[in-house]
Image (cartoon, rainbow, N blue to C red):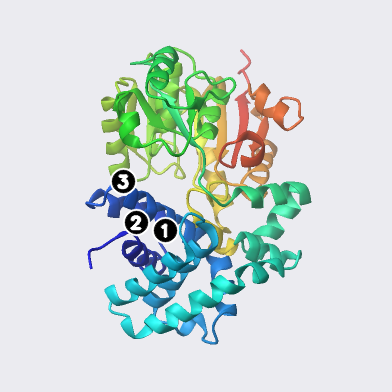
Amino acid sequence: MAENARIMAVKLLQKLHLSNGYSHILLDNALSGSAMDDAERALLSHLVYGVEERRLTLDYLLTACTDRALSRLHPCVLEILRVGAYQLLFMDRIPSSAAVNEAVKTTRALKQGQASGFVNGVLRNLDRRKHELLENLGEDDAGLAIRYSCPTELIALWREAYGEERLHALLDSINGAPPTALRLNTLCTTPEKWADFALKNDIAYTVYPGLSASVCIEDGISRKKLAKFGNKCYYYQDIASQLCVKALSPQKGENLADVCAAPGGKSMTAAQEMNDCGRILCGDIHGEKCDTITKRAAEYGFHIIQAAARDASKPCPKPLQGVFDRVICDVPCSGLGVIRRKPEIRYKPLADTKDLPELQYRILEEAAKMVRSGGVLQYSTCTLRPAENEEVTDRFLREHPEFSPRVLPLEDAFAALAQQPNWRITLFPSVHGTDGFFIAGFKRREEQA
């Protein structure tokens, strides 16, 4: 039997759980060398991301439909069941009979034919009982965990941090495809040229308020269709990252540093705001990522971006101290704001991230040394966790009186939260239509003569 999306999905999910890796990396690598057509590629992506994001739900329902412990099943058989169950529960366009039959075929194709009867029986049982099992879930945290496939410790964290109403909005937002956002490269095109192209090619889109070079498109648009516009005339960048650069407010001719820059999107957007005039120094701990930033910036026509490998948590070199107009620290974080893009993040124990706030604080402290008198420092994460956001920035202000809060120029984003502009903001998927994100602004006090 020729390899298809379901077979590849089972293989990738096995590999993902064996390596404890990231779905988007495994999927990108698999698709880059695949001869699958567009329909099979789309199905593969849907299955891998879908099964991973709904894993708690799927395992709960499968457990209820068999007397065998899932932990005792062959890993391949378990993933076949998950892929089949996902289709039964969350893919209405696939008939139940097809989902079950394809699962049975997959067991044989992957040399698990002895389990074909078992797989057939479990999935048919699930198809009969799925509505009953889901309707009987409680409204307590255990029920929410199964319904939304979100661990109870993360539910408790978000409730404590943001309240009951925001918790439920977050749970509603963590499953399903995230919005697709582009940043137009204004060095080689204009919003008007995009509008003309979109009209001629029947592409529906919206422009995010206050971001004229942003484009939010429907998820069904193929990359082949977009490529006709010119691959270097746009790049993929979530609205949260674009708002992060807007908050920084880089100006033409300035000296800017991006201390944790990879993959370089924020630096490229900043270069546009600066009309490619000035200097942007990008840093990353991995030299190969710096090489990629340099190459990518050149391909897109940005001349002011330079990249060099450096560990931003280590003491700041003397030549970099006090010379930058603006410094941005988008620090390594737990990623709880991008669960829709990396669904496996939700299953990682919070205890594994206990050391992150200290690392984040060290990076912020060293980055602060780079800011000139009167200059701007900005801290950001793509997580929704006060220990990595508010607590880090509160500590910084307590211990660094030479900096004061800087009100962020994000009036629309604050208005969506019914708040007045302030020096820090949390962006929520359900409120702002972005990834979950945190931004805080500081300004170094002017030195007295």
Q: Quarter of the image containing the N terminus?
A: bottom left
Q: Residue type at mark 1: give it.
A: Val
Which image quadrant for residue 256? top left
Which residue lies under the disc numbered 3? 38
Q: Earlier in the sequence, mark 1 or mark 3?
A: 3
- How many labels were placed on the picture? 3
Q: Is residue 85 left or right of residue 233?
A: right
Q: CA distance from mark 1 to mark 3?
A: 15 Å
Residue bearing the label numbered 2: 26
- Which of labels 1 and 2 is toward the front? 1
Q: How many neighbours does mark 1 have within 10 angstroms: few (below 14), some (14-19), or many (20 or more)?
A: many
Q: Is residue 41 left or right of residue 140?
A: left
The quarter in which the C terminus is drawn is top right
Give residue 188's position: percent from left, percent from top.
33, 16
336 in relation to 180, above or below: below
**Foreground residue among 215 and 239:** 215
Amino acid identity at mark 3: Asp
Mark in front: 1 vs 3: 3
Which residue is at 31% across, 62% downward? Answer: 8
Residue 342: image location, x then y, percent: 48, 52
Relative to 190, residue 179 above or below: below
